[in-house]
Image (cartoon, rainbow, N blue to C red):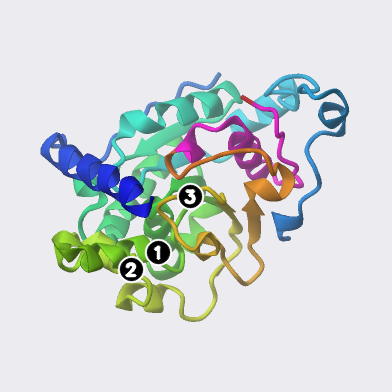
Amino acid sequence: MLLRKIVPVLAFTVAAVLAAPATTALAAPDRPAADADRAAPADPAASRTGTPAAGDRETSTAAQIAAAAAGNPVIVVGGLSGIATVYQPLAARLRADGYRVWIYQLPNLGLGDITDSARAFSTFVGQVRASTGAAKVDVVAHSEGGLVSRYYIKSLGGASAVGRYVSLGSPQYGTYVANIVKFLGLGSCAGIVACQQMSIGSTFLAGLNAGDDTPGAVRWTAVRTLQDELVRPVDNARLADGATNVLIQASCPLRVVGHLALVLDGTTYTVIRQALRDQAIRPNCFAL
């Protein structure tokens, strides 16, 4: 079963490398339009009726949309082999809720050194802040993107430039899927540096996780799912030291969300939106 899951991912990674564009980052221009593993259940009205209380955007009032438009710009940070197009649906949801949104595609699709990607991300954040006049940005980061942006915050001075950090299935403490590539006879992650760094026990992760997981005044949220086929064990996507950790199935036990689906899933998006609004995390289990 695990091999059936890993092989397509490796094939996708190779294909993505061959098709990688010359640019390393894509900016999507502005088009405004406590531990939650024990989070409160989804909308009570939805639970009683078996249908959403008022649709996926039941909490998106005009005032909230206006506040989002005036608030921090949001940078969606892609993951390993994640081309910018994959994150357009998430960016579209955020724009519909009023946010100014940019997409950051990792240099070389995230195959290289995570610390190099973080330095490039630091430059990108500076460009977004300069173009908007914003003092801070908010970050919604998928998979490896969560490590890139977290390294930027922790080691490159990003704590003063980021207001909110939301990771989606990021292997904060590594994943044995990276370790097993070597077991399959493909060498040390088939030579992919970022994969080596995401292996459990890597030197990179030892440094990243030394000391405080959540430095600065950043509001930290880490989202994970039981069906994550690439981050194993799934609890390695958690953060310590006061972060809000959200397990989707703690509130929505029947919700099936894979690693890549975290950026497309409606329930996950309700968590992202609540985190960006500094609201209590109450996932809508019926959101599309």
Q: Do the residues labelled 1 and 3 touch (CB within 8 Å)?
A: no
Q: What element carries label 1?
A: loop
Rendered location of residue 110, percent (x, y): 26, 51
> The residue under label 2 is which amino acid type?
Ser
Placement of 100 over or under 127, stated as above or below = above
Residue 141 is a magenta residue: no
- How crowded is the residue under tag 2: few (<14 C-alpha within 10 Å), some, or many (20+)? many
Rendered location of residue 154, percent (x, y): 45, 68
> The residue under label 1 is which amino acid type?
Thr
Q: Magenta span covers which residues? A: 261-287
Residue that numbered label 1 is attached to = 175
Q: Residue at x 32, y 75 (%)?
A: 202
Q: Is 212 placed left or right of 180 in the picture?
A: right
Tell me the number on the disc at residue 199: 2
Residue 279 is a magenta residue: yes
Q: Residue at x 59, y 29 (%)?
A: 69
- How crowded is the residue under tag 3: few (<14 C-alpha within 10 Å), some, or many (20+)? some
Q: Do the residues labelled 1 and 2 touch (CB within 8 Å)?
A: yes
Q: Is 126 placed left or right of 265 in the picture?
A: left
* Residue 89 visible in the current orientation: yes
Tell me the number on the disc at residue 195: none
The number of callouts visible is: 3
Which of the two discs, 2 and 3, sits closer to the camera?
A: 3
- The span from disc 2 to disc 3 (Cα, nearest Å) is 16 Å
- How crowded is the residue under tag 1: few (<14 C-alpha within 10 Å), some, or many (20+)? many
Residue that numbered label 3 is attached to = 228
Rendered location of residue 108, percent (x, y): 19, 47
Q: Is mark 3 on a helix, strand or loop?
A: loop
Closer to the chain start, of discs 1 and 2, is 1
Rendered location of residue 104, percent (x, y): 34, 41
